[in-house]
Amino acid sequence: MELDIFRYILLAFLILCAVYTCIGKGLLRSIIVYMSYSLIMSIVYLLLESPDLSITEAAVGAGVTTILFFVTLKKIHVIDAEEKIEDENPDAQIDMTGKQEKLPDVNPKHRRLVGKIFTASGILICSAIITVLIYTVSFLPRFGDPNNPVNDEVSERYIESGLEETGAVNIVTGMILDYRAFDTFGESCVLFIAVCAVMIMLRSDKQDDKEKENNNDRFYEPKNDLILQKAAKILVPVLFMFGIYVILNGHLSPGGGFSGGALMGAGLILYTSAFGFSKTERFFTMKTFRIVTCSALTFYCVAKSYSFYTGANHIESIIPLGTPGAILSSGLILPLNICVGLVVACTMYAFYSLFRKGGF
Amino acid sequence: MSFVQNFPFFSIIIAMFSGIISSVLPAKAARRLCTAMITAVVIMSGCLLIFTVRTGESFNYMMGHFPAPWGNEIRAGVLEAAMALFFSVIMLFSIISGLGQIKEEIESTKQSLYFVMVNLLLSSLLALIYTNDIFTAYVFVEINTIAACGLIMVRQNGHAIVAAVRYMVMSLIGSGMLLLGIILMYDLTGQLLIEYIRDEVEILAASGQYTVPLTVSIALMGIGLSIKSALFPFSTWVPDAYGYSITPSASILSSLVSKGYIFLLLKIIIRMIGFDVIKDTKITVIFFVYGVLGMIIGSVNAIRETEIRRMVAFSSIAQIGYIYMGFGLGVEAGIIASVFHILSHAATKSLLFISSSALIKVSGDSKKFKDLRGSGRRNVLAGVTFTVGSLSMVGIPLLSGFVSKLLFAEASFRSDTLTMVITLFALAVSTLLNVIYFLRTVITIYMPQDSCPLSGSGVLTKAKNPPVFAAVCVALIALNLFLGMMSEPIVNLIKSGLSMFG
């Protein structure tokens, strides 16, 4: 009963945060509220008994995404510009370069009217969609009812014979990396192609561009911040250990490649922001990134192709499942988890460094 | 189990694999790998088509050691194989005719990344065609979205980046709605495999349970996919995205990406929900209304346009309208007409984009109509190709556009009277509008060129068509004629494909 009240409070906060993120003045505040939204969401996931999702949400939603937003805002000087403009003129428009926007010569009254109509119709459409969705939810099967359509032969087999068929104690990992491994391969490729798209957009390849970015970077980022460095010295090893633990135990306990990789990525980002790129580049460069990502995905592709091919053609797979519960068990799941973890960690770090200075 | 049955899986996986390793290859190797991979997919899809036509039935292919509904599954029949063959052929033509432009306009260090996008885009299209699992479809829709954004913004100028951002925002709204629809459907049926959802939906529809959420779920999926495939009110991103990206990207986006989503929608309509249930929800009426509106408004916008590329882009909106109108007729003949129009439009639109870029090139890189005067004489082959494409769009007999218009008109006779009248009227108006803007363009490119100077700084040049470009033009014209003249066997193929598909 007390837990129920707690849940309602959390959900109320969730809605408040979501609304504030949309309408709040100032991007910086919106981002911080958005971060707390993600944290609440991860607690909600935990209360719904899906710890795998909760770890991922906390690491990706609250951690990495927020940092990426910050880096971007800093890079385009919105944070400084916002402070300045708030002092001078609270209504002024901020554009991406921090300068006053030059508007085409249109009647200002006309412009304001169009803007108002636009806002009004936006609010109208959104509230219509929200009403329809809430109305729909009231017709859905009751949450947690054992007679729901989702509790059918599919989930029954996952729960009852998942351990025996995949060798994974953590059924969720067994599902995503064995029963539905094709989807997960697709998801890893989503991350990979996202990094490639960001590279097309942001990577600076010309030599003088690179130097300019490097100089800029040193100019705007804090150098040798003592508090940050001391904190990072304690936190980074812990983050790495925890990340590696989550990845390696993906088939035994909550977590797996995605969550563990996100944790390790967050560790790398923290290390870089405390000690600068020169320290990180001793062990992690563009080349490392390319080799690690490419070989991890290649291994995933080859391993899964083998298993798909043998499965579809009814050939017995030669990969042993091992004893459930041991660290070396459940066939391909452990190596696949390591691959996914490497891809995710590299991707997170690559996003950070591409956003911050357009390369490694 | 025959070895050929592995081909759908092979073609998806080699496309993904070459996407992954392209990222570490130098540009030249990535280019070669890409063309080799697409050729391999073309050959495999051809074999698969022959195989499925011979056996006369579709087959399911287990992805892994677990049978459906526990594991992933793909399914291939005549329609899927034909689509895969057609899509990969158009992809091959678009890429090899645009290799020159890719080399010139993309930074040399980023060319291999472009091929990563192309390879993964092809893999996602193939997966959308073959998949028998709605969640797998969603995962590949994500890949498709990001790859399409990459294709637009690879030309690093302001216009292209703004177009990519617009595309991304609209497309992500579409993905979100699709995902919500899939979640609702899972909540109601407890299944993700398409055929198993069908069984559950039939039970639900018969018993009248959960009518509201079922309708909302279908509506969300329908609207989500129509945003992504640029149905009329959601098509504001089209002219920029197609108009300002490089030619191979524009031709892939307009002839393949939007068609991939439409094919997924077709799969949802026919195989997942069942056409009868869809008709009961009245969502076909919405498709019909917006399809007709799109046909007319897209053409009107095209008439007002002053740049050739954007005009061709607006004409895409009109053609997408045709396809949705076919879905909206609510009869099987309408679906057949729509599927034929997917093929016909893909063949014609890629031809128009490829030939118009050659015309632009000989007019001092200006897209404005007034600078294009006489360009059909400066580059004879491109001029002829563009003319053929325009005539096909207008609907001149012997060309593919005529057959699809005929099929739409025939299909409308099987619908009720009001629908029939509206369809025939819309077809007539749209044809008239097509005549105005396409024939105006054709006349423009053959007009004697003015003595007045060009608006830009470019100079008029004589064309030197590389042999690859010439071959692609001839092949596309031949494809168009083939679709126009041999429509009988193709329509029969689509018919038998659809009967296996459902």
Image (cartoon, coloured by chain):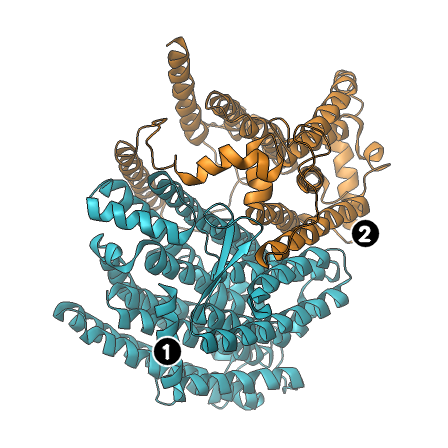
- Name the residue at 66% across, 39% down: A333
Question: Helix, strand or loop at disc 1?
Answer: helix
Outermost left residue:
B417
Is there one chain holding both mark 2 and mark 1?
A: no
Spot occupied by residue A217 in the image (x, y as percentages of width and height): 75, 36
Amino acid under disc 1: Tyr
**Label 2 is found on which chain of the structure?**
A
Left or right of A29 on screen, residue A193: right
State whether residue B275 is above or below residue B470: above
Q: Quadrant of the N terminus of chain A?
A: top left
> Rounded to the nearest whole Å, what is the CA distance between mark 2 and mark 1?
47 Å
Q: Residues within 10 Å of mark 1 (few under 14, many from 20)?
A: many
Left or right of A95 on screen, residue A320: right
Q: In which quarter of the image is residue A154?
A: top left
Chain corresponding to cyan in the figure: B
The hue in which chain A appears in the rendered picture of the protein: orange
Outermost right residue:
A282
**Circle 1 residue:** B437
Q: Is residue A211 visible?
A: yes
Question: Helix, strand or loop at disc 2?
Answer: helix
Amino acid under disc 2: Gln
Q: Residue A207 carries which label?
A: 2
Left or right of B113 on screen, residue A140: left
Q: In which quarter of the image is residue B394?
A: bottom left
State whether residue A130 is above or below residue A20: below
Left or right of B219 on screen, residue B97: right
Spot occupied by residue B354 in the image (x, y as percentages of width and height): 55, 76
Q: Which of A91 and B373 is in front in this view?
A: B373
- Name the residue at 58% across, 45% down: A184
**Label 1 is found on which chain of the structure?**
B
